[in-house]
Structure formats: C-alpha cells, structure tokens
Amino acid sequence: MLLKPVHERILIVLIALHSVAVGIMLMFFAEWAVGFAGWTGAEPIFFIWQAGAFHFVLAAGYLVEHLRHRSITLLLIAKTTAFVFLLGGSLLADTPWSVWFSGFADGTMALVAYLVHHTVSGRADGS
C-alpha cells in the first residue's frame, strides 16, 4: 500500500490524541493515573498536573507544526527524548511497568512517524 499525506496526517493526529489522553489523565485523574501506572502516592500533585499540561502543549505543538509546515521535528525530538529518558531511567532505578511500557511506546511512535514521514515526503530530516 502506498502511503499518502493523509495517512501521515492521521498518524500525527492519533499521536497528538494520545498526548491529550495522557494529559487528561494526569490533570484530572492524577491519583488514579499514578496508581494505575504502578506508583505509590501522588504528592506533590502539582508536578503531576504540570506533566499533564506539558502533554497538552506537546499535542498542540505536534498538530500546529504539521499543519503549518508538514514537518514532525518537535514530535521526533519529544518522543525520542522520552524514549531515552524513560528507558534510561528504568535502567538506573527501580521503576514500575508503566515506565518501560511508555518508553517503548514513545520510541515506537517516533520510529513509525519518522518512517511514514520519510516515505510520504521523501525526506529524512523530519522537516
């Protein structure tokens, strides 16, 4: 199947929706989200809310960049950084299942977005 720009657009929207869903969980259901992820306690809650707000900013950034410039540089930077941070942190400290899972999920999103973008645009630089 030949990938088209619409397929890339759908992928970027789905990745942004994932970030919005994580943002909603962290901002509005923080204690549940933290417990589900395998952590004990959600104190201080402010930093969990801040992480939720950050996910909203990223989701908006992914969409604005792609809609305006047809590029995915922010998405690649954010997802690759998350991949390295989450998996690296898991190697250095005892972390719950969600850290490993999130690291692999972010790495997978970055790789798939890169491959689709490269295929659709014929460019390898993320722009």
Image (cartoon, helix red, strand yellow):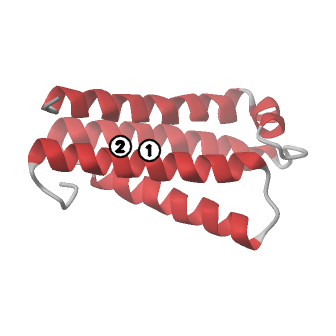
Seen at 61% across and 28% down, the residue is: 24
Question: What is the quadrant of the C terminus in the image?
Answer: bottom left
Quadrant position of residue 22? top right
Residue 124 at what x, y percent from top left? 17, 59
Instruction: Name the outermost residue toward the bottom.
Output: 92
Q: Is the residue 84 above or below the residue 13 in the image?
A: below
Query: In the depicted view, which residue is nearer to us: 63 or 4?
Result: 4
Three-letter amino acid code at the position of disc 2: Gly
| Residue under numbered circle 1 | 58
Q: Are marks 1 and 2 in contact (CB under 8 Å)?
A: yes
| Residue under numbered circle 2 | 61
Three-letter amino acid code at the position of disc 1: Leu
Instruction: Name the outermost residue toward the left.
Output: 122
Count every numbered label the image shows and give the total.
2
Residue 85 at what x, y percent from top left? 58, 64
Secondary structure beneath disc 2? Answer: helix
Instruction: Name the outermost residue toward the front.
Output: 1
Crowding around mark 2 (Cα neighbors within 10 Å: few <14, some 14 to 19, many 20+) is some
Residue 15 at what x, y percent from top left? 41, 35
